[in-house]
Amino acid sequence: MKESWSSLDTFEPNFRPLVVIELAKSTKEETREWLTRRIADKKANGGAQLLVKPLVTEDGDQNIYLVGASHFRLLLGAETVGLVKECTDNSMRTFTYSSRKTFKGFADDNQSFLTMAECQYIIKHELENLRAKDEKIIPGYPQAKLYPGKSIVRRLLTNGILIQIFPLHDQEELKKLRHTWYGRVKIGYQPLDEIRCYFGETIALYFGFLEYFTFALVPMAVIGIPYYVFAWEDYDKYVMFATFNLLWSTVILEVWKRLCAVMTYRWGTLLMKRQFEEPRPGFHGVLGVNPVTGREEPVYSSIRRQLRIYLVSLPFVCLCLYFSLYVMMIYFDLEQWALDYHKENESNFSSLMLFVPSIIYAIVIEIMNRIYRYAAEFLTSWENHRLESSYQNHLILKVLVFNFLNCFASLFYIAFVLFDMKLLRQSLATLLITSQILNQFAEAFLPYWLQKRHKKRMKKKMYSQKTDTDLSLVEQVNLEKEMGTYFGTFDDYLELFLQFGYVSLFSCVYPLAAVFAVLNNITEIYSDALKMCRVYKRPFAEPTANIGVWQLAFETMSVISVVTNCILIGMSPQVNALFPDSKMDLILTVAFVEHMLLAMKFVMAFVIPDKPRDIQIKLARLEFESLEALKQQVRATDYKASSK
């Protein structure tokens, strides 16, 4: 990032803006002074001991503040949050300031020892842990109650005083990253380490999974092309493709866990200790005492929460599922109408009309998914979950159940009720391709176009103002604060999850599904990179050791794919010919094979270690050294006590 940020540097030569705080324009002066004083105050006095400067614009508003920290303060913060860095002996250890000289690349004058993403994560942690001491209210706002231990930032957010906190982009580093990431079309790996240094581990892990999943689809695509060309109408031959599909869906997920462990060990997040979770900003309740921390915080009855879940949320989800099935039946009525119309006319237009119901249904599915997502977020927030992890788990469960039924119910109905493989092929192809086109347009190209228009308007406005402050800083902050907020990888993983379902559940009927998935993912890498660098504000880095609950979601989908593919194999004329007299023998045989394959799948999951052998050894060695150090500390304490 540029050194000559503004005239502020005259007063603080080492001040480097890292994070932006935007307050409401109507925020009272005493509130601003109190907040900046608390941010800058020493840790011993309950402050965050950070550097904070107002960003003064032409109109004189001081509702935007730039936050930074000294190098020494960031190093202490790195120890507080438990960052793991590489040592000179190539091992990974939790950073401590007292042993800083033992870490690779450390020097007192080396400002790049901590990445900018790590520095911003440290500042975010310190701001979120800025707590009330003896204040009863936020100065200037009697209705904004405080109590000892309450997070000040969370109270400011819930009362609308604080608009947003976001990390600044580093324009020079971003330009380099854009060039190596998506600046030129090339066949190769993504710069995952550079992505991790700039955006953090969570986003780097998503792009790593996207890249891995794309490469994992290549064998399916390579087999699918000749399969489509030479055996398209011969459904007997999809038995071999379905069998390969079963093995493929199991192996790729087990291999991913190993690759994920390798990456996160290299990045240090595999060793990071899980921090104690604070109540989420939207959580509310009667003031009580947390039995774990002993601090005062809102308390909400778990019984009331369960009543809300089972008496309101669950019936609402069931009603949405029923509505989805009702829309599906309307789709089949349209399919029947298009088929009758084609039989009566037998023209090119009527042939095209056969695809119209599937296209309309695919668009309706996307609209319903997005509307339901908002409803699910509202319901999950209304359930009043205390922790963010609990909130996310309940939200993911709601969304996955609805999306699974909404996207795949029609395919199951066609395959196992109508037994129409030709219609199944047509519907699968139309749903897959239409959803991919709509997602690319809605997630990347439309936001990019809107952001580009907004950027032009902002530049005209900024250059029309004559300001003495460094224009590059004012312009950057004003542009970035108006950019959209990236709400995490939820939607991105959901898209891959549904794609995995299309490929693994029924791709033996439509072998080109994997081909279209590969082509989509290649463009997805570039479009997602574009939206991260150009469309959205820079998100805060979030350390993570894996893809979380999505690993379980993908594994569940692979189990369902075993069942569906076994039934499809059992329905094939080739297998039916082996049991001409007894359908019960066929059903029992298919059930036996399905159970054996599931057993084989779980055995493979058990036999294949989640972590490679060398990483297991390194982790065991670190655990042994930690225990030995603890024993020595206990012995030293006992010796001192006995010598007194």
Image: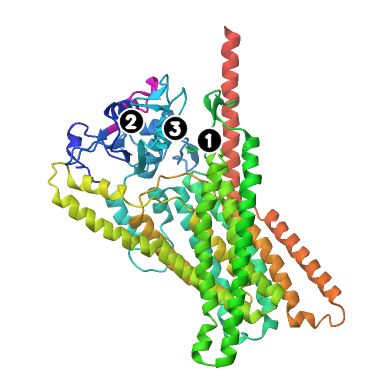
Find residue 85 and report its horizontal and vertical position in percent: 45, 40
Q: Is residue 576 visible?
A: yes
Q: Within the image, what quadrant is residue 151 found in?
A: top left
Q: For the point 59% across and 82% down, which residue is it? A: 337
SS at mark 1 in the image: loop
Q: Within the image, what quadrant is residue 21 found in?
A: top left
First along the sequence among labels 2 and 3: 2
Residue 404 falls left or right of residue 2 = right
First along the sequence among labels 3 and 1: 3
Find residue 435 and report its horizontal and vertical position in percent: 50, 68
Q: For the point 57% across and 57% down, which residue is it? A: 256
**Amino acid type at mark 3:** Glu
First along the sequence among labels 1 and 2: 2
**Is residue 611 one of those drawn in magenta?**
no
Q: Give the numbered dot on residue 101.
A: none
Residue furthest to the top in view is: 644
Q: Give the numbered dot on residue 79.
A: 3
Query: Comparing marks 1 and 2, which lies closer to the viewer?
Result: 1
Query: Comparing marks 3 and 1, which lies closer to the viewer?
Result: 1
Tell me the magenta residue range. 38-52
**Mark 1 neighbour density, 10 Å: few (under 14) some (14–19) many (20 or more):** few
Q: Give the numbered dot on residue 50.
A: 2
Find residue 362 and report its horizontal and vertical position in percent: 53, 70
Q: Is residue 296 above or below residue 535?
A: above
Residue pointed to by mark 1: 277
Q: For the point 33% across and 26% down, which residue is it? A: 140
**Amino acid type at mark 1:** Glu
Q: Is residue 635 above or below residue 528?
A: above
